[in-house]
Image: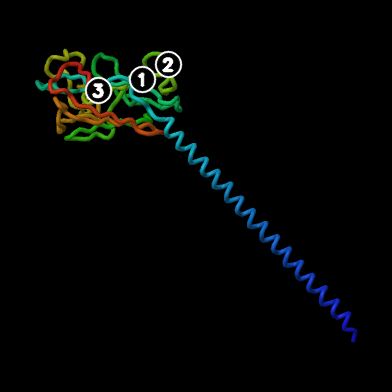
Amino acid sequence: MNMRGMRRRDRGITGLETAIVLIAFVVVASVFAFTVLSAGVFSSESLKQTIFAGLKETRSRMRQNGGVFAFSGNQGTTQTVYKLVFIVSNSLAGEAIDLTPPYTMNDTGLDPDFDLTAIPATILSYADEDQRMGDVPWSVSFIGNNNGDTLLEDGEKAEITVWLMDRDHSIAITANNSVAFMDASTANGGGVGGLTAGSKLVGKSTRFVIEMTPQIGSALTIQRTVPPGLRQVMNLN
């Protein structure tokens, strides 16, 4: 037997096995590298989406402009706050905010007036030391430059009226029964979601919080205190 030939064949087999191992190593390394790169791209994309979502939340936030005003009338013979008014704008030139209101007002007859066709996207809540109303009635009036729709866009301002009680304009504001509880009765406005007969009237020195929560973005929180002496119109700043 030729031993030299056997040694050559042994060396050939060893070289082939080595080549196979090297090829396998390269393939495994390539798959691993592809997996790592794919995971990195996916993570980067997810991080980018998270950042953009956070920016969207921030840029969609509202800002209060100017003061908060409280208006009082008489429920029976008792003077009480029946509505709150403030102005908001779109902060940081953010995305448009839907301010389609659930109620309208016209300062005649009974206010506010329920809008059957409206689909509100923004919710207002009211709370004080004695009660909380999670979806209080409100109306809006755009002031200054605006394009006529109910979207609060960059450069626009909207006056928000929070209705705690119904207002009967056929009765002088200083007379008895000029405002009424929101008991859904069409005889005094038909409003719901505000103060009812079982609620405590908003009187002097009442501390309260209003939260205005849009469909997208952070809520606008307003905290104020009613003065120790009630007047028909009060600047709460």
Q: Residue furthest bottom?
A: 1
In this rendering, is residue 156 above or below 215?
above
Helix, strand or loop at label 2? It is loop
Work out whether residue 70 or residue 47 is closer to the camera in this orientation and state it. 47
Work out whether residue 47 or residue 181 is closer to the camera in this orientation and state it. 47
In this rendering, is residue 228 above or below 48?
above
Rounded to the nearest angstrom, the CA distance separating label 2 from label 1 is: 9 Å
Work out whether residue 67 or residue 19 is closer to the camera in this orientation and state it. 19
Q: Residue 34, position in %: x, y?
A: 64, 53
Helix, strand or loop at label 3? It is strand
Residue annotated with mark 2: 146
Name the residue at 24% across, 23% down. Answer: 84
* Residue type at tag 2: Asn
Residue 84: numbered disc: 3
In this rendering, is residue 99 above or below 37?
above
Q: Residue 179, position in %: x, y?
A: 17, 21
Q: Residue furthest right?
A: 2
Is 139 displayed left or right of 197 in the figure?
right
Is 214 displayed left or right of 224 in the figure?
right
Residue annotated with mark 1: 158
Is 46 displayed left or right of 57 in the figure?
right
Q: Quadrant of the N terminus?
A: bottom right
Residue 234 figure quarter: top left
Q: Are marks 2 and 1 in contact (CB under 8 Å)?
A: yes
Of the two numbered discs 2 and 1 on the same chain, state the one appearing first in sequence: 2
Helix, strand or loop at label 1? It is strand
Is 33 displayed left or right of 102 in the figure?
right
Q: Quadrant of the C terminus?
A: top left
* Residue type at tag 3: Leu
Residue 97 figure quarter: top left
* Residue type at tag 1: Ala
Of the two numbered discs 1 and 3 on the same chain, state the one appearing first in sequence: 3
